[in-house]
Amino acid sequence: MNEPADSHSLPVDTYFLDSAHALEIALQKNIIRQEDQSERLQLCYYASHPIESDQPNLIHLPITRFLSYFIENESRIVPKVVCIGPGFDKDKVRELEGSFQSVVNAVVAARQEMLDHRTRDVTYQDTLFESGDDALLEAQQQNKLLSVHPTIFPLQICYYIGKPLTIDHQLDNLIHIRHDNMVNAFLTTILRLPTRFVGDSQKGETNKKIFSEAMQRLFVSIDSHKTKFIKKLVRINKERRPTFTGEKPYRIFIPTSIYTSVMKHASKNLCKAFERAGYEAFYCIEQSMMHEGVEGVYFQGHFETFKPNVVIRINHPANYALHPEMINVVWYQDIMPDLRNQRAINWRTRDIVYTLDDQLAQAVRKTGKDDVDIQFPCVDHESIPASTDDFREEKVVFIGSSYVKRRLLITTEKHVHYVRYIQTQIDAGHLFTEADLTRFSEEYELGYLDVYQLYNAMVRDRLVRWLCQSSPIPVEVYGLFWDQDPVVRPYWRGVVEHGPDLYRIYQSARYAMEAQGTALHTQRLAEMSLCGCIPVVYDCRKFVVDSPHLWDDEILFFRTEAELRDRLTKAPMGDPGKIGSAMTYERFVQRLVQRFDTIIGR
């Protein structure tokens, strides 16, 4: 196809080989109308060199990225036709059109395969087999469950009650249950219970049906008894009055889940900090992805055995099952559903709430908790090796993901106008406040969360581009999705996991940039400072609330591309290492203990 649909035909989403032609059509703002769908702009993808444009329906997509771009995100709309443009003979045009159609067909096939895969996986359940041989065959498939967690897929558990298998199968998810002990085993196990029951495949359909129906009836009873048992443990734990005695009077219980990412590491580091301070602390987490949830027998049993007087959770109050004198700490690090929906929470007198920033604190106050304190992210300084300047290079690094996927939030003309305004203001060096974002939400008639997330996305992506375009010293960028940005891609060095590899990168560089629009005290800031980097940070001090430090002398702040370039030739007046030292888990523990002492009158 040499020309896209003109004004006399219906527009379709098109892939252009020429960027200028794509821009020309995109500026026409052709509307696509489809049955049972809302109206939207025609999408104009293009393959050639990237061009600067704020046109929301103009998308740069190199040919080499075509397949992965549409497979990695199924919400992306695949173009229906290709616009090749002049300069090609008919045979070449037919060849290119055929190649384009082949790639589109590959996308459609890949998406269908993923759909089929998910559909098949949804049917997988933890299963009790009558026959060990049947259980072995299914366990060997290492099927994953989709129903336990939206992004983490644990292995299907295959129980069986027949004769024990004699082979050494070495399958963790294949578990023999003695028939004469089956009820007691399932009442007391900390593993997930089966929800599917399969009779012996060698005994015919009638026997299989009889086995399945009998087990379904039995497990209704087991579920009921287990629920009663858990409720009994909850009642015992709630009725037990905590005691506070001795020189180190606090026994800290810190539950979390194996299915979290940041939360489980923060919980573990906080537990270690309490232990280093001489307190008894218990880090309660599932030992396997086959375990039941943290509120089941495993959690309640350890709670009853450990007998804590302090509970600390990240993101969840869960205070309904605590004795009134139990001290309960909640450290919010994310906008959880209760906060997003402004749902009232029945806060207790001894509930202590911290949040990472003032925006989260305001959300908590709307649930009925007036006294909320700010606790910035912490860093486990014990895990960071001592740094030296002997091998430090004159370069600048940035570690953090691109927010390119937040473009999916841009769904209306109001979103487009807001994003354009923010981009021009960032480029001009204008700094905003939280009150400004609230005002933008009202002026543009957008949800505050959209305004907040798009602002941070514009800041992040704009600043990293500035760094790559203007830095007077070598640049290295690490994190997800930067390979999709043509300006940043030459400087992208891949993705780095939290831990030793990340620390080594910081310890190899003279400078490190942080690119947040609304938060100054980030974990990255603490890590780069403890690793000996000079922090070069976008000036977001106007957003900082409840902090004794803004680190005016320890950080090189910037607000424009020119200032960023200048800061990469300077050194701060103060010692950046002070920043990380003030953001350790030890400092948080000291703060918490002082609060505990006040509560019990110590």
Image: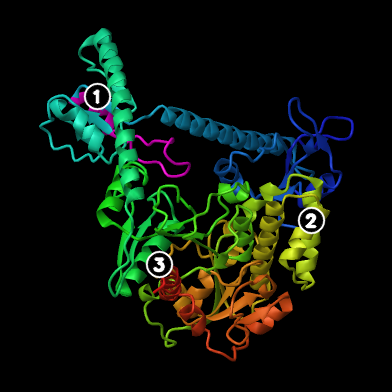
> Principal SS element in the magenta part?
loop
Residue extending farthest to the right is 8
Q: Is residue 559 above or below residue 118?
A: below
Sooner in the amino-acid sequence: mark 2 or mark 3: 2
Quadrant of the rendered image containing residue 536: bottom right
Please give the residue where the numbered disc 2 appears in the rendered image.
Answer: 418
**Residue contact between numbered discs 3 and 1, judged by CB atoms under 8 Å:** no
Q: Which quarter of the picture shows residue 547?
A: bottom right
* Picture coordinates of residue 121, whole percent (x, y): 42, 31
**How far across and how far down the image is residue 469, in percent?**
68, 71
Looking at the rendered structure, the secondary structure element under dot 1 is strand
Q: Which residue type does callout 3 highlight?
A: Gly
Q: Which residue is mark 1?
A: 129
Tell me which label, 1 or 2, sits earlier in the chain: 1
The type of residue carrying mark 1 is Phe
Nearest-to-viewer mark from 3 and 1: 1
| Magenta part of the chain | 132-157
Q: Residue most toward the bottom? A: 573
Q: Secondary structure at mark 2?
A: helix
Instruction: For marks 1 and 2, give the CA distance.
Output: 58 Å
Residue at 48 percent of width and 41 percent of height: 150
The answer to whether residue 352 is above or below residue 181 is: below
Foreground: 304 or 141?
Answer: 304
> Is residue 522 rendered magenta in the image?
no
> How many angstroms separate mark 3 from mark 1 (CA)?
42 Å
Question: Which residue, given by chain and number where applicable, does mark 3 sit on?
Answer: 499
Amino acid type at image mark 2: Tyr
